[in-house]
Amino acid sequence: MKIRRIEAKDNARMAAIVRECLTEYGCAGRMDTAWGDPCLDTLSEVYVLPDNAYWVAENDDGLVVAGVGVGELEPENSICELQKMYCVSTYRGTGTAQQLLDTALSFAKEHYQIIYLETRDNMERARAFYERNGFIHTTETYGHTGHGGCGCHYIRSLK
């Protein structure tokens, strides 16, 4: 598996992966999830600031199968958000998501003190994955993510 920064050629594929996963979990067309993000089709254009980044996982055939981003959320509190972490179903449980998360956390540690994420209640495998990686469930929300459809919030110290 090759982990690399997103490029313009990956935009359509990553948007399709996000929509495929959201459809799988009953969120097709829900504008209060990543589906409604105005930047979903142009991720490579969004993650160009020094403190933001997006990576994709490319299989041996050169097909993008997953992605994850880190974006500034509350600069005054040094909080970032783990963003748009999605993986096609056939690559779940293969270590791909772990490689992506490790990459994202390593980057985030260089720029922030805390990382936050939002996910759906019914994404049990994702929630267990985040908890295994040190994320703690919180009732607090941070920033203005626009993801009111995501009822589970997690936070983790990066220090």
Image (spheres, rainbow, N blue to C red):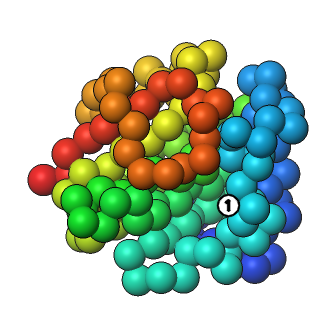
Q: Is there any visible trace of residue 102 in the rendered image?
A: yes
Q: Is residue 9 above or below residue 81?
A: below
Q: Position of residue 47 (x, y in %)?
A: 56, 74
Q: Position of residue 28 (x, y in %)?
A: 85, 33
Q: Which residue is drawn at the image coordinates 80% and 65% (left, top)?
A: 41
Q: Is there any visible trace of residue 88 in the rendered image?
A: no
Determine which residue is flagged by label 1: 58
Q: Is residue 124 above or below residue 48?
A: above
Q: Is residue 37 above or below residue 51?
A: above
Q: Which residue is drawn at the image coordinates 34% and 60% (left, top)?
A: 74
Residue type pointed to by label 1: Glu
Q: Secondary structure at mark 1?
A: strand
Which residue is at the far left? Answer: 159
Q: Which residue is drawn at the image coordinates 35% and 24% (left, top)?
A: 139
Q: Is residue 93 left or right of residue 135?
A: right
- Quadrant housing residue 27: top right
Q: Is residue 141 left or right of residue 156?
A: right
